[in-house]
Each structure stands twice: as structure tokens, then as C-alpha cells.
Amino acid sequence: MNIENPYAGMETRQWLRGNLHAHTTASDGRKPIQDVINSYATLGYDFLMISDHDIVTGPADYAKLDPRGLILIPGNEVTRNGPHLLHVGADQRIEPDADRQLVINAINAGPGFAVINHPNWEHDFNHWSFDQLDEWQNYLGMEIFNGTIGRLDGSPYATDKWDRLLSRGRRIWGFANDDSHLPVEDVGLGWNMVGTTDRSVAGLMDAMRRGCFYGSTGVNITAIAVTGNRIRVETENADRILAYHQTGMEFARVDANAIEIEVPTRARYVRFECLGRGGRAAWTQPFYLEAE
Ligand SMILES: [Zn+2]
Ligand SMILES: [Zn+2]
């Protein structure tokens, strides 16, 4: 069995913390853009993407501001006419066509990539229905955690839809973002730890495309190693780690800060959830498996 390890060489990479989903007074956020940047800089973040609704915030906008040491990624949240998605690394405004496949195709024709937003928002938990997620192709990832949905209808988590898609053989990376609108309450809820060799927008984008990152709400992963058909995950502060494969089936669990598993022979993918105190978590990306 061949295990694709998106974290190969992770010990040689620098691990940068960032949020790809933040609003400002340019759309429906409560704080001007410089204040939003300041909030994340104060928390010690390394990168941030401003994602106002159908508004691209790009290099020319960022150049007028003090980055406070943050790497600022050009971005947009495609919003009108349908379910929301992030244009990460946006070089131009994409017309928010109701056919989201056209939007995703237009994003993919440029340097950026598409990330599905808050699939389980709204009273029916179906901001993005499973059928839409199943039908539309070539988005790089989806928010498996969106902090702000915690105070709105639906669920901030979307690992349920993620497992269903992965079980069908789809390749989709899991992101954790704040979607911050409120100045204090929404900031620092969920973030991505990205392993990059290059501290730049391009370096971060490349690492995320490869899946060399994990979403977190407070658990830190310190090492991931693949040896033969075994995977080991070590954390700083988890007290329970769960291993899942297709259809969301849990096949291993430890009450410890590290786990080592043998990949089940018929697994199509495996992924890990690391749980810590106070509801903190970290989600590894799926390890895709190919029979040799
Ligand atoms: Zn949204
Ligand atoms: Zn948003």
C-alpha cells in the first residue's frame, strides 16, 4: 500500500499560523482593515487573508497598510447568488455566477484556489448541501471549522460532509478559519498551521496546495511520520486522538498525546482528530492510500 504523506519533510519546514477568512468595514465586518490586521498581529499570527464579500483585497490595498509582520494574502469571499467560497490568492474579482462551478473554474484559471465556506451554516445545516459539494469539482478544500458559525445557526464543524466526500474518492483539504466579523469575539477561534520552506504568499499557497498544513482550534501537532504502513502523530497538548477512515469510521483511539496506527488494509484514506482540553482540536489532512 502506498501512503501519500502531505507532511513529508515537515521537520525541515517552518510552521506558520494564519487565518484565511476575515471581514472588515469594507463589507460587513465591524473593524477597519488596519484594526483587523492589528488584532491578528497581536495574537502572534504569521499570515492573514482579508476576505470581504465580493471585494478583492490585493497587494495595492495591503501596500497602504502596516502589515505588522504578517504575510497578507490577496483574497475575496465569493458571496452573491449562491453558497460562499473563498478565492485564496485572488488576482481579480470573479463574477459571482450562480453556477458555482463557473466560479471555481475561473478561480482555477488564475493563480489562486477555491475553498468552500461554512458548509453546515444555517438552520438546515445546508449552506452547501452535500449534493452541491458532490457535484462541483476542483475546489482545493473546505472549511471543516468556521469559528463564527459557532454563534449562528448550524454547526461550525463540517467533518461529516468531508468524510462523505473523501469516502467517494474526492481529494479535499480541510481548513479551519475564523470568518471574523466582530472585533474580539470572532478572532483567534480557528486557524491553519502551514509548513512552508518559503515565508511568502507564494510559499504558503504552494504548501496549502500540497496539503502540508492542518486546521487547529488550539491543539499543536509536533510530528507526523509515515513508516511502511504505519502512521504516527505526536502532539503537544492533545489528551485524546482518534483515527478515521472512509465513511467516517473511527478505527483507533488513544487517550494520550500521540498515536501510532497501522493503516487498515481496505482503507481509502485515513485522517486524525486530536482533541485537547476545553474543546480544543487539531485535524490532520487525509492520507490518501493507493493499493500497489
Ligand atoms: Zn460566508
Ligand atoms: Zn465570511
Image: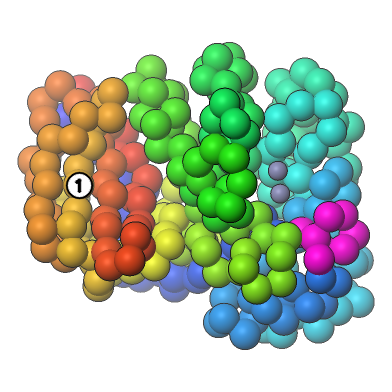
Residue 115, position as x, y percentages in the image: 61, 40
Within 10 Å of disc 1 (Cα), the crowding (few <14, some 14-19, many 20+) is: some
Nearer-the-camera pick, 149 or 252: 149
User: Is the residue 149 above or below the residue 264 in the image?
Assistant: below
User: Is the residue 67 above or below the residue 170 in the image?
Assistant: below
* Dominant SS in magenta: loop
Magenta span of residues:
23-30
In the image, what residue occupies the spot 55% across and 14% down? 131
Nearer-the-camera pick, 89 or 276: 276
Would you say residue 39 is visible in this rendering? yes
Residue 142, position as x, y percentages in the image: 54, 39
Location of residue 20 by image quarter: bottom right
Would you say residue 146 is visible in this rendering? no
Location of residue 195 by image quarter: bottom left
Q: Secondary structure at mark 1?
A: strand
* The magenta stretch spans residue 182: no
Residue 120, position as x, y percentages in the image: 54, 34
User: Is the residue 39 above or below the residue 1 in the image?
Assistant: below
In the image, what residue occupies the spot 81% across and 66% down? 30
Residue 178, position as x, y percentages in the image: 59, 58
The image quadrant where one finds the C terminus is top left
Q: Which residue is mark 1?
A: 242
In the image, what residue occupies the spot 28% across and 29% down? 248
